[in-house]
Amino acid sequence: MPDGVAIRPARVGDGEAIDRVIRAAFTATAFGHQGEADLVRMLDADGDVMVSLVAEKDGAIVGHVLFSRMDVEADGHAMAAAGLAPVSVIPELQGQAIGDALIRAGLADLRVQRAAMSFVLGHEGYYPRFGYSPGLAARFASPFAGPHFMAMMLDSDAAWPQGGRADYAPAFGRLG
Ligand SMILES: CC(C)(COP(=O)(O)OP(=O)(O)OC[C@H]1O[C@@H](n2cnc3c(N)ncnc32)[C@H](O)[C@@H]1OP(=O)(O)O)[C@@H](O)C(=O)NCCC(=O)NCCS
C-alpha cells in the first residue's frame, strides 16, 4: 500500500466523500456507475451495514469498502453472513493494494463480529486471494448465482455447508 494511506472506519460526515470515490471508481470501469453510491446510502438508512471502512491519504478519502447483512440459511439454520459490495479505490491509486487492505481489514472486522460467511459478486480473478470461492457459493440458491458469485467461510477451518439460500439485503433489490 502507498505510504501515508490509513484504513479507518467510516464516520458520520464521510458520506459525500465516499460517494465521490465510488462514482470515480465505477465510472472508470467498462460497466460504468450503476447506482453503487445510492446503494451505500440505502444500506445505511436500512441499518444493514455491518462494516464500512475508508482508506485515507493526506486527509482525503481515496477508497471505501462496505459489507452488508445478508439473509442466509445454511443446512437448515440461519447463518450470520455479510455481502461485500461495493469496494472502490480512486482510479489514480488503483493497483497499489489499497483495495486489498480494505477487504482484508473488513474481513477481520466481520470475524470480530462473529459473522460466519461472506459472499461477493465480482471478478473471479480478484476475490479468491481473500478466500472467496465460486464452489462454495454454488451450493447456495441465490438470484445472483453464476460464475461471479463467490463465498467464503470466515473461519477457514469451518466445514462448508452442504447447501442453502443466500439473499442480499433488501436495498440490493431496489437498485435501478
Ligand atoms: C476493484 C478495486 C477496488 C481493487 O482495488 P485496488 O486497490 O485497485 O486493487 P489491489 O491493488 O488490491 O489489487 C490489484 C488487482 O486487482 C485487479 N483489479 C483491479 N481492478 C479490477 C477490476 N475492476 N476487476 C477485477 N480486478 C481488478 C488488478 O488486475 C490486480 O490484479 P493482480 O494483483 O492479479 O495483478 C479497484 O480497482 C476499483 O475501485 N475498481 C473499480 C470499481 C470496481 O470494479 N469494484 C469492484 C466491483 S466487483
Image (cartoon, helix red, strand yellow):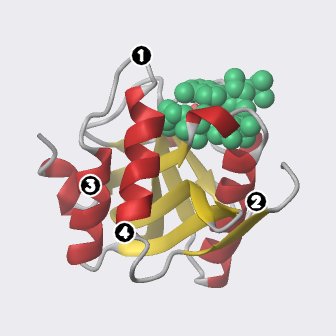
Contact, mark 2 vs mark 3 (Cβ under 8 Å): no
**Residue 39, numbered circle:** 3
Q: State the residue position of label 2.
A: 156
Across and down, in percent, residue 115 comes to 55, 74
**Residue 30, numbered circle:** 1
Q: Is mark 3 within 8 Å of ligand 1?
A: no
Q: State the residue position of label 4.
A: 15
* Sequence-wise first label, 4 or 2: 4
* Sequence-wise first label, 1 or 2: 1
Label 1 to label 4: alpha-carbon separation = 25 Å
* Sequence-wise first label, 1 or 3: 1
Q: Amino acid at mark 3?
A: Leu
* Sequence-wise first label, 3 or 4: 4
Q: Secondary structure at mark 3?
A: helix
Question: Which of the two discs, 1 and 4, sits closer to the camera?
Answer: 4
59 versus 138 height, above or below: below
> Which residue is depicted at the point 83% across and 61% down?
4
